[in-house]
Each structure stands twice: as structure tokens, then as C-alpha cells.
Amino acid sequence: MDHEMPRLMDGSTPVAARGALSNRAGRYEGHARDTVFEGAVPTTVRDETARKVISTNRSPDLGFDRSVNPYRGCEHGCIYCYARPTHAWLGLSPGLDFETKLIARPNAPEALAAELGARGYVPKTMALGTNTDPYQPIEAKRRIMRGLLEVLRDHAHPTAITTKGTLVERDIDILSEMGPELCRVGLSVTTLDDALARKLEPRVPVPSRRLKAIERLASAGVTVRVMVSPTIPGLTDHEVEAILHAAREAGAQAASMIPLRLPLEVAPLFEEWLATHVPDRARKVLNRVREFHGGKLYDGGFGHRMRCRGVHADLLQRRFDRACASLGLAYRLPPLRCDLFHVPVRAGDQLALL
């Protein structure tokens, strides 16, 4: 087997253990640039003081209206990550900058507690990990996600977590304490091929390790959803049934699937990745993606961006639905409870007079 390092079109080699192969300027910068790196690129982290941490949305495609993200950027380096374009808002590249220049929000737990304690706050499910992964490698030292979970537990606030990181196992004590009425975890498994995963998601635990995390969470009484996301047509879509079966065997109770999304700067980054790592399949993948989106690489319109359209998209959805039905995997789970929410009494608070 040929283990030679793949080369880019200019003859250089990819940056070690990173997903992006370039560092082009974001869409808001006035001058084009593409910094060239050699060898390893270190991760740097700077802190940001957050006044508020709850983000809200009105998207009909999402099953939540509020979320919290402890970090900007993500060291996991997934080449297909739809959150990459958010780094352009910071004057940074959605390419290598997104996975090497991170921003942490160490006061996020305190800011969250203040927002939950505000007069008139009405609880609904809080989503964690909807933009960048809260269990990316730097969380092991920073522990911001754990602090957020402690706040949500103390307020009995309904919580839904999305992650690829097996570090979620560290917080099983909090998750099991919250129980299935207040918390659930969605764990993404893109492929069962560990070698392919290392190229797609270079700093994510391999799929076999993620399946073990599902098993450990489920054994602790935590409700787990396997997310077959993103499903990449022509590259990983043939694995849908196998992923669902493996996740069900590990203890997952529910499943979801979202086809590949390539918004804004993600499209050229992914095209570059395909040409370097799987050149024999690049044309097939891109043609199928265009078919999913009406001839474009991406259509972000409400009601479409999460499902796609066309003959192959419909077939993929039917395969997914049939596999879930045969395995007993739910698509919808009972809503988390909001009626248990309360603001805990803290030292120094004046108790209400009887």
C-alpha cells in the first residue's frame, strides 16, 4: 500500500494533522491572501470576556431557538465544517485559522447564570455545540463546557448537546444526574472508516472510539442520538445503514441525518481537500452535491438546506428511514422538561418572606 503523503496542486504537502489545506482570506477582508505553512501549525488560544452567551435564532430548520458556544473556532479541523465561515467575522481565515486560532470564553458559565436568573426568563431547550464543538481538545484544560453544564444542572434547565468529542464521557456524572428528562447527547459519526476519518476530521477521536462513547453514555442512563452527519454523497453515503447498526448496538436510542453542506468559504476548501485526498472520487462527489442543491454546491434556503432534493437525495432519505425503522431508532424523542426550571438560591440571596 502506498503511504506517501498526498501533495497539493502546487506540489507542497498538506499541513500535518489539520483539515484545511490553505488559509485564504475571509470574505470581509479587503485583500486576498493565502499564507503558506510548512510542517505543524500550533494551536493558539485567546480569551474573550462575554457579556451574554445565549444566541437565539428563528430558523424553521432547527429544533431549538437558543444555544451557547464556549469556543470560537474548532481544533477538530473537520474539513466540511459549516461553522468555518464564522471565523471571517473575526477577520480570520475560515481555513487553517479556524482550526488553529481559537477563542475561549472563560466567563461563559457566569454569564449564562446571570441570563438564566434574569427576571422574565422563560426556559426552552438550550443547545450546546451547534456551532463549534464544546468538547474539542482544549476543553480538557479549559473546562468551560463543564462549567456551563454545572449551571444548567443547578437550574434544572433542559439541555441538548451536539459533539464528536469523547471528552463528553468526563461529564457523565452531571449528565446522568440531570437524567433523560433534562438532557440528551447527539454524537456525530460520519464514517466507520478510521483512515478516512483521520483525513476528514483530523483531530476528532476515530469513529470506533466514538461508538465506545455512545456505549458508555447509554450505560450511564444518558439518552444518546447518533447523528449521521454530514452524509457525503459519493464518499460516505454507502455507510448509512452500517453506522446506524453500529450505533444501535452501542446503545443509541435515536438517529438523525443531514447531507453535506458547503456554505460560503467551505466549498473551495472542500474541493481542495477532495482533489488532494480522493482525486478519483472528486468529480462524482461534487456532481452529486450539485444534484442535491439544484445545480449549485449549496442552497441555504429555509426548508431545504438540511434535507436536499433530487432522486439520489430521496433515495438516501428512504434508506435512512427504513434502517431506523428496522433498528428501532427514533427520529423524534419526547420533549425535554421545562417545568423543572428554577433559579437556585445562592449565598447572600435574600429569601422571600413567608
Image: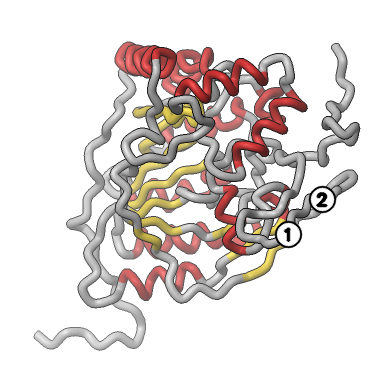
Question: Mark 2 Cα within 10 Å, few/some/many (few <14, many 20+)?
Answer: some
Element under disc 1: loop
> Is residue 169 among what the camera can see?
no
In terms of depth relative to the viewer, which is nearer, 143 or 257? 257
> Picture quarter containing residue 314?
top left
Image quarter hosting the C terminus: bottom left
Q: Residue most toward the left? A: 354
| Rendered residue at 53%/34% (across/down) | 213
In the rendered structure, the answer to whether residue 149 lies left or right of residue 123 reads right
Classify 145 as above or below 64: below
**Residue assigned mark 1:** 31
Name the image colouring: secondary structure
| Rendered residue at 29%/72% (across/down) | 344
Q: Position of residue 240 (x, y in %)?
A: 48, 17
Disc 1 marks a residue whose amino acid type is His
**Residue assigned mark 2:** 41
| Rendered residue at 38%/71% (across/down) | 113
Q: Position of residue 253 (x, y in %)?
A: 35, 28
In the rendered structure, the answer to whether residue 199 lies left or right of residue 211 reads right
